[in-house]
Image (cartoon, rainbow, N blue to C red):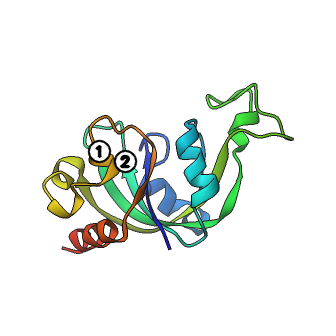
Amino acid sequence: MQYWLMKSEPDEVSIDDVMASPDQTTPWFGVRNYQARNFMRDGMQDGDGVLFYHSSCPEPGIAGLAKVVGGPYPDATQFDKDSKYYDPKATQEQPRWISVDVRGTQKTRLLPLAEMRTIPALEDMVVLQKGSRLSITPVTAAQWAAIVKLLKN
């Protein structure tokens, strides 16, 4: 089992939206960075743990826990000319972008980015590194355990 931090802007898809979705499951769409896409395509597996992170908002941070359900598949928004995620170079035969489904398992208290920076066990976490802008990053088992423990307090 692997662990991931996945960022979403809460005005696009929030943890509340996921928890209110049928089966508490939603497609993770709109990723347009090749490294993040490769994590979804090549690294994520059914059952992997997800830290659901709210970004680009007044107080960014981890807002819930989730898991990957199923495998990767083509992101439908790349083919939709009305979508802000449309990619004219993508074709059905050769899609460029990937989605995975994510199932919310628990809405938690918000663990703000500022608080995360004060936790020694998280100092090497990718999201805390200067200049880190990826929407999907790997999380170690130790980092996952430290965060889950913090969220239970």
Check disc 2 and report its element: helix, strand or loop: strand
Say what amino acid the circle numbered 1 marks.
Pro
Q: What label sits on residue 79 in the rendered view?
A: none
User: Can you tell which quarter of the image residue 147 is in?
Assistant: bottom left
Say what amino acid the circle numbered 2 marks.
His
- In this view of the protein, which residue sits in the foreground, 98 or 86? 98
Q: What label sits on residue 60 in the rendered view?
A: 1
User: Can you tell which quarter of the image residue 30 is in?
Assistant: top right
Q: How many marks?
A: 2
Q: Horizontally, is 70 left or right of 36 in the view?
A: right
Q: Quadrant of the C terminus?
A: bottom left
Q: Residue at x 25, y 43 (%)?
A: 59
Marks 2,1: beta carbons within 8 A = yes
Check disc 1 and report its element: helix, strand or loop: loop
- The spot of residue 145 in percent (x, y) is 30, 73
- The spot of residue 76 in percent (x, y) is 73, 43
Measure how far apart labels 2 and 1 are at the Cα level: 5 Å
Crowd around label 1: few <14 · some 14–19 · many ≥20 (10 Å): some
Q: Between disc 2 and disc 1, whose residue precedes?
A: 2
Q: Is residue 51 visible?
A: yes
> Is residue 145 placed above or below 50 in the rendered structure?
below
> Is residue 109 placed above or below 8 in the rendered structure?
below
Q: Which residue is mark 2?
A: 54
- The spot of residue 102 in percent (x, y) is 55, 61
- In this view of the protein, which residue sits in the foreground, 109 or 78? 78
Q: Horizontally, is 31 left or right of 51 in the view?
A: right
Q: Horizontally, is 133 left or right of 27 in the view?
A: left
Q: Residue at x 64, y 53 (%)?
A: 41
